[in-house]
Image (cartoon, rainbow, N blue to C red):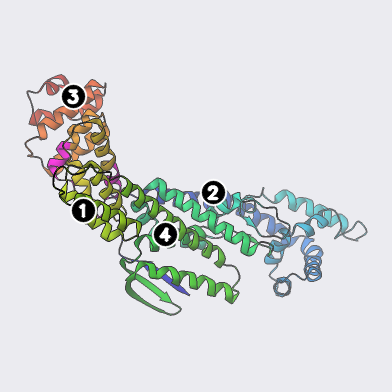
Amino acid sequence: MFYAIPLDSKPDWRNPPWMTVLLILVNMAVFWGPQRTEDTAEQKATAFYARSVLPALELPAFLDHLDAERVPQAAALRRAYQAGHKGPVLDAMEHDTAFMSRLRAGGVVSAAHAQHAEWQADRARYERLRPAPFTDRWAQDFRPDAPARPVTWLTAAFLHGSTGHLVGNMVFLFMFGFTLELAMGRTAYLGAYLLGALGAGAMAAWAYGGQRGIGLGASGAVSALMAMYAVHYRLRRVRFFYQLFFYFNYARLPALVLLPAWIAQELLQHAAGRQGVGYMTHLGGLLTGAAVMGAWLLAHRARGAGAADAPPAQGQDDGHTAQVENARRLTGALEFDRACAAWRRAAALRPQDAATLKAWFHLARGWPDRDDFHHAARAIFRLRPHDSGTVALQHATYRTYVDLAMPAVRIPPDDMVRLAQRFCQAHQWEDVEQLCRALLAAAPTHPQLADTLCRCANGLLQVGQQVRARRWLPHLQRLAPDDAATRALA
């Protein structure tokens, strides 16, 4: 058994991983809601079944049916029955459509049987006690005669078989999920997670179809996150804790090394024939996650490279064109670190070229904990033009930067002032107020603080947001007591 858990990253609760938290809450709500309700009703029905005449009349006939059909699990179920463990036999019987159809039609306990009337009454009561199916309905069905239901490739990823099963999956979902959510953005991360669940479910349907039983659990989707983590950080050396059977230790290796180790583990476990764990489901998640992250990185870098359609240099070439071409070539070759350095050099040559800065930022956002991401964002914040296109670029960059920046947002006070005043023109009031609060905390004596707060309050008043504007009155009375906005609010 091999486990590897990355230790370098930790969540920043100033920018919470809300989508990861939401996925965990959905899984918990499904398990503690409809699944737990169903389980409670099933326990009552099973308790009645155990004290009725049904086990003695039905279970031996079911075991004979398995022997006749040469089902691989027949011997193990017969041993469980002989040892007094009737629960697994009953569960297997309930999932055998052919046998249950014959049983309910009177083909197992016939009308000529001495206990037929008693069996019929107990069977009818047991059927009434059983809850409407929920888990079986939305889990993957691997019976030979089960109809194809691709929707369960996705829905099964939100079901779990026990509290331990749920907790284990949710721990790994959080450890890998929060890092990827911050790196990819919430929407792309959610889409990648769902695609991982679908890929894992498709592999499970192919590998286990016709072998009986059901498939459920988030482990396939979580495996996809693990592969996405490895592919996203590739050669970046990460510190992780690992356990190999009874040996455990810490190591610092390139993240991509973990992917073949995880794949090998699933293949070996599957080859060993261990029952009860969907190793091929995990493998499907790993392969899907690696493919999804590879496609996302390529598309992401291509958008960044295509954004830099810089104008030709005037007069003598300053080297900018060569740097842009080099950055595009390196991006196409997937040498992202060197490509980022090339964009940085191009931006240094033309610090007011919006297209170059945008390309640099788009590439650097894949590593939101590195200096390039912070420097590229600040370079865009310092663009001088006041046209609507520049302000829109600055606002989009600001939102992305605030969402992803690690370990924390780093915006100097002068840039806060510039952005707050420009966002006032764009009527982005929530971001204006956010910047004003940050400016009050970071630079309470900044020379343009009073003017920035006045613009914020005036703008809110003009759009009819008197209540929000009035919240700034104490600061305005202290910093700008004679301003028109202060007098209007007072």
Q: Marks 2 and 1, Cα distance to the nearest angstrom?
A: 52 Å
Residue 85 among magenta residues: no
Mark 3 or mark 1, earlier in chain: 1
Observer able to see residue 388 = yes
Q: Which amino acid does label 3 sit on?
A: Asn
Q: Residue furthest bottom?
A: 247
Image coords of residue 9 (percent x, y): 31, 61
Quarter assignment of residue 139: bottom right
Locate residue 415 relative to residue 196 in the image: left or right: left
Q: How crowded is mark 3: few (under 14 residues within 10 Å), some or many (20 or more)?
A: many
Mark 4 or mark 2, earlier in chain: 2
Q: Which residue is tagged 1?
A: 344
Mark 3 or mark 4, earlier in chain: 4
Locate residue 6 relative to residue 75 in the image: left or right: left
Depth check, mark 3 against mark 4: the one in front is 4
- Stretch in magenta: 399-418
Q: Which residue is drawn at 36% across and 71% down?
A: 241
Q: Nearer the viewer, residue 390 or 460?
A: 390
The answer to whether the residues at label 1 and label 4 have Cβ atoms under 8 Å apart is no
Magenta: predominant secondary structure element? helix
Q: Which residue is tagged 4?
A: 228
Q: Which amino acid does label 2 sit on?
A: Gly
Mark 2 or mark 3, earlier in chain: 2
Residue 401 among magenta residues: yes
Q: Which residue is tagged 2?
A: 33
Q: Which of 106 and 224 is in front in this view?
A: 224
The answer to whether the residues at label 3 and label 4 have Cβ atoms under 8 Å apart is no
Depth check, mark 2 against mark 1: the one in front is 1
Q: Marks 3 and 4, Cα distance to the nearest angstrom?
A: 47 Å
Q: Marks 2 and 3, Cα distance to the nearest angstrom?
A: 49 Å
Image coords of residue 39 (percent x, y): 61, 54
Image coords of residue 295 (percent x, y): 43, 54
